[in-house]
Amino acid sequence: MTFEETTGSVLTPEAQVALDRATGSAHRHHELLSDRAFHIKQSAVRDVFDISIRPGLISLAGGSPYLQSLPLDGLADAAAAIIRTQGLAALQYGPGQGLQELRELACEVMAAEGITGADPEDVVITTGSQSGQDVAAKVFCNPGDVVLCEDPTYVGALNAFEAYEVDMQPVPMDAYGLIPEALEERIQSLKAAGKRVKMLYTIPSFNNPSGVTLSADRRDEVVRICRENNILVLEDNPYGLLRFDGEPLTPLRAAHPEDVLYLGSFSKIFAPGLRLGWALVPKHLFRRFYLACEAVLLCPSPLTQMITAAYLRDFDWMGRIRDSRRLYADRCAAMLSALEDQMPDGVTWTVPDGGFFVWVSLPEGIDTYPLLTEAIEAGTVFIPGAAFTPGDEPSSRLRLAFSAVSPDDIREGVRRLAPVIRRAVGDG
Amino acid sequence: MTFEETTGSVLTPEAQVALDRATGSAHRHHELLSDRAFHIKQSAVRDVFDISIRPGLISLAGGSPYLQSLPLDGLADAAAAIIRTQGLAALQYGPGQGLQELRELACEVMAAEGITGADPEDVVITTGSQSGQDVAAKVFCNPGDVVLCEDPTYVGALNAFEAYEVDMQPVPMDAYGLIPEALEERIQSLKAAGKRVKMLYTIPSFNNPSGVTLSADRRDEVVRICRENNILVLEDNPYGLLRFDGEPLTPLRAAHPEDVLYLGSFSKIFAPGLRLGWALVPKHLFRRFYLACEAVLLCPSPLTQMITAAYLRDFDWMGRIRDSRRLYADRCAAMLSALEDQMPDGVTWTVPDGGFFVWVSLPEGIDTYPLLTEAIEAGTVFIPGAAFTPGDEPSSRLRLAFSAVSPDDIREGVRRLAPVIRRAVGDG
């Protein structure tokens, strides 16, 4: 399991209060906490993390990318050469916007997905897409403002936004992603209720956690609905290039440079340990966004930027992505066939075209959170669905990740999970 | 000039409005901006940055540490070995709190300054002290809450806090740092005015920009005053080990583990380009602070953490600090003697015991901001004093940095600056 998943709420409200009490709510400094501090939630899986890395356990929880195919020797040499020959720049403060070369390379990455003509001047290097979400919340959201999101959506984004007391409002999806009619209806009903809707946060390609992709024919319509309601689209696209077959779908940003603030990430196409991503910001919003990035961080690390630039410049990064797509496709297929073999009637799941995740639905009324303990006892682990939706309602869904586990382990993990699910469904 | 200084306001309000207009305030998305977005200011020196790096110009503006003494070959080998042998961990997601080894090493660094017995469990690795300020503002400050600070104080902290609509209230200093009576008086008058005072942000050793140090006999009193008024102390101590002579003064945190949230930085004792620092958090506040860090960033870069840990573990970092202290002392002496030689009557300056900066005071009524253009024409650059105080008042002060410039260049830079100052003082 990685730590990408550690920022949603799965503690019950009672447990949260008990934890507060144990960790200082009785202390005189408790009254110094900001209102927003109470919206920053306990980790979704922090409480199972130590367990989940124990030997022998097969984790289907973490969305870690497959790194074994990285050219480690070549990267080691590249990093050494950077420090040896450009060390005084790599180890010093750098520009707040990020290095020119890496901003240009980010534009090349975007071009590979169909965003052509992006201007490196409109790019800010971030410390990962998560920090882009944090800055977007800071720049656009007052307490109580609404940000629309897919239902389900990325747990880290929920936590980044809720830390600014944003009212996250989920919009239903079907197998083709966000439902435009549902989006329009939700906007109108929120407006009628006097709410201020600021943004749509969307992961249109291979949504985390559901694996669902917004179909090509809905993409313009989603942006049009937002534009007509003066809502900014925040497009988070870490997985876009990881489509199993065929060409990547063109991001929303491509045809709508004024309406979409685009977040890219080097975590899935290169490596998450560098902690780098980028934002492509509409020109009229660039200055505000950029200044907020600088206020949080001063500047991203020149060293990790130079290493990332060297990787994209001197290595066959696109070839490795092609290989990764096949590898993830095989793993996904292994998971789907294991689910087919093992899951009882009444359990359904998504069939993703890319990305890292399958979203499993149990019959309504079953809460998947208590099943986590049983799953761990059975030797596997997943993320309960409640983490991926605002609010504290129980969920009958769960997320399985296939990205970081071999096909054999995927099959074994699902085999271990199956009896837990069967018992819950009453089919055990 | 580095970019550490690029986050304060020196644009006039009129220029700010004009810039807004030119960069999109007429756009329909303008109304989507949060209230706090309007508190995130234009860079202090962004407008002179391009000029300041032009060949031949001597910059006395930037607080960059001296890196030429770093063992670049050794660091290159260390980084290569980390990627080659631990690459799959270094390049993957890591723990949100930071690596255990680096948290232990941070405790060793703190012990060298007099904070003994710090528990690595209470340490969170940050992406630099600036991000620690951002998270502290997020966790403790509602809009309108007061944070007290030294007058003058670090421009980046002003911007980090003001991005949360914090009311930054400066407290007078003298040559021995914050004046306890003035602190008490300011607190009482703010309370009487119905203000909520949450924190004291302080750089007690070699304050940026003034170079002034809070004397040992005032340290306990400052904490006592804050404790009695239920105000948390946020101690920012990037320069503490860089005292020219004698032992470092014991940080406020040492004797007051419950009352002080301590921010450390690897930027000045190692290198800023890794973008790493740490927070030592009182146990009763740890969980809130840690969760907020994670919501912003997920995790700091394992790669840069491992490189930093290798530097602190395998190299003579303390020996290099000893050498750096002598080097900075020589540069400071060169600056003080150049000022003595060149400055007209009526101009005074601080005499720091460590750190990177000298703070120059012109007679009241002279605004140093317009002098910047003249200085650049004369071939040098400084930071106008207004950047280091909340609000938009003109300032008769300016900051000179000696850390990144050779003694000869310091003398030449001051020689170039002197006629500008003399003209302003009417002594030209």
Image (cartoon, coloured by chain):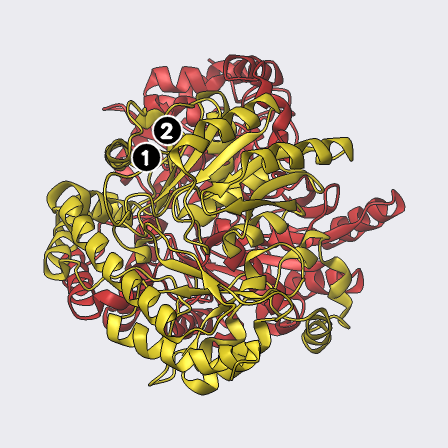
Chain colours: A yellow, B red
Q: Is residue A178 above or below residue A257?
A: below
Looking at the image, residue A294 sits to the left or right of residue A388; the answer is left
Q: Position of residue A232 (x, y in %)?
A: 54, 30
Residue B241, quarter of picture: bottom left
Q: Secondary structure at mark 1?
A: helix
Looking at the image, residue A84 sits to the left or right of residue A139; the answer is left
Pick the residue in front: B423 or A82.
A82
Is label 2 on the same chain as label 1?
A: yes
Looking at the image, residue A53 sits to the left or right of residue A31; the answer is left
- Label 2, label 1: how many angstroms apart (C-alpha)? 6 Å
Q: Position of residue A147 (x, y in %)?
A: 61, 40
Pick the residue in front: B412 or A181.
A181
The answer to whether the residue labelled 2 contacts the one labelled 1, judged by CB atoms less than 8 Å apart, is: yes
- Is residue B322 visible in this depiction of the protein? no
**Quadrant of the image containing the N terminus of chain B:** top left
Q: How many marks?
A: 2
Pick the residue in front: B178 or B332.
B178
Q: Position of residue B337 (x, y in %)?
A: 38, 38
Within 10 Å of disc 1 (Cα), the crowding (few <14, some 14-19, many 20+) is: many
Seen at 26% across and 31% down, the residue is: A111
Dot 2 corresponds to which residue? B414
Residue B218, quarter of picture: bottom right
Seen at 52% across and 77% down, the residue is: A372
Q: Secondary structure at mark 2?
A: helix
- The numbered dot on residue B410 is 1
Identified by mark 1, the residue type is Ile
